[in-house]
Image: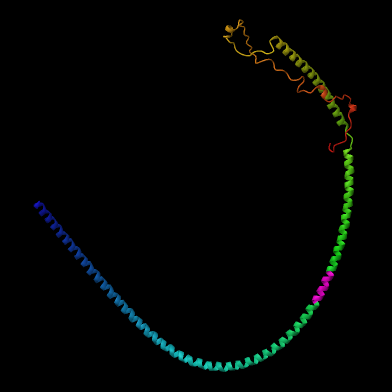
Amino acid sequence: AASAAAALREEAAKRLSEAEAQHADLLKQAETKHHTAVEKLQQQHAQELAEAAARLASAEEALRAEIAKLKADVEAEKAAGAKVAQDLEESRRATAQEEARVADAQDALRQATERYTNRIAEEKAAHQAEVARLRAEANQAKEDLIAAHEELQAAMRREHSEALAEKDSKIDELVEKLHTLQDMYDNRPSREEDLERIAQYEQALCEQEAAYKKLYEEMHFYKLELVNREQNYNKTFNSAPNVGVLNPMAAAKKKEAVVRIVQQPGSLPPLGGIGAGVPPPGAMKSCRTQSGSIQRRPSSGRR
C-alpha cells in the first residue's frame, strides 16, 4: 500500500509538473501575442496620428484661404451696402412719389365707386321693373296656356267619349252577330254520313244483343243443369257427408264396422242466383232495326 501511494504521488507530481510546463508555455505564447498586438496597435495609432496631423494641416491651410476669401467678400459686401444705401434713398424718394400717385388714384377710385354705386342702383331699379314686367307677361302667358290646355282636354274628352260610344255600339253589333252565328251553328242539320254511320252502329248493336241473348239462355240452361245434378248427387250420396279418417276402435263398440271415408271437401258449393252478375237480356236497350227511327239531333257545338 505504501508503494502504491508513493507511485501515485510520483505520478501526480509528474502530471503537475507537466501541467505547469504547459501553463508556462501557454502563458509565454499569450505574452508574445499580446506584445505583438500592442506593437501592431501602436504602429496603427502612430499612422493614424500622422494622417490626422496631415489632414489638420491641410484643413488649416484651407481655412486660411477661406478666411482670406471671406475678407474679400466682406469688402465687396461693404461696397455693395453703400450702393444699396444709395439705391434705398432713391427708392424712398420714388416711394414718396408713388404714395402721392396712390392717393390721387384712391381719390379717383372713390369717385368712380360712387358713380358705379349710383349706376348699379339705377340698373337694379330698371332690372326690377323689367322683371316685374316679364313676370306679369309670364303669368298672362301661363293663364293663356292653362285655358288652351283645359279647352284641349275638354275636346279630347268629348272625342274619347264619342269613340267609346262608337266602340260600344260596334261591340254590341258584333256580340249580336256572334250569338246569331252560334245559334246557326248549334242548330245545323246532321250530316248524311253521320246518320249512315249511326245506323250501322245500331245494326251492329242489335246483332251483338241477339248473340248476347243466345249466350245468356245457354248459360241459364247449364246453371239449371248443374243445380239439378248437385241435388241428385246429394240425395244419392247423403246431403251431409262426414269428412274424417278411419277409426280402428269403432268395430269393438259397434256391431257394424262399416266406415265410409269421403275424400272430397264437402258437397258442391251452391251456385249464385240464376243469372247472378249478368244482366238479363230484357235489361238492355231494345234494338232499333229501322234507320228511319233515328232522330236528327242538334249539334253540341263541335263536329
Estimate the x, y position of residue 208 in percent, counting from the top left.
81, 23
Figure label count: 0
Residue at the farthest left position: 2
Q: Nearer the viewer, residue 255 or 144?
A: 255
By secondary structure, the bulk of the magenta-drawn segment is best described as helix
Who is closer to the viewer here, 197 or 269?
269
Q: Residue at x 83, y 27 (%)?
A: 201
Whether residue 204 is visible, yes or no, is: no
Q: Is residue 212 left or right of residue 12?
A: right
Q: Quadrant of the C terminus?
A: top right
- The span shown in magenta is 134-145
Looking at the rendering, which quadrant does residue 231 occupy?
top right
Residue 280 in the image: above or below residue 92: above
Measuring from the top left, give residue 295's x and y in whole percent. Answer: 89, 31
Relative horizontal placement of residue 64, taking residue 293 as reference (left or right): left
**280 falls in the magenta region:** no
**Relative horizontal placement of residue 193, taking residue 25 as reference (left or right):** right
**Residue 53 to residue 301: above or below:** below
**In the rendered image, which quarter is residue 275 located in?**
top right
69, 142: nearer the viewer: 142
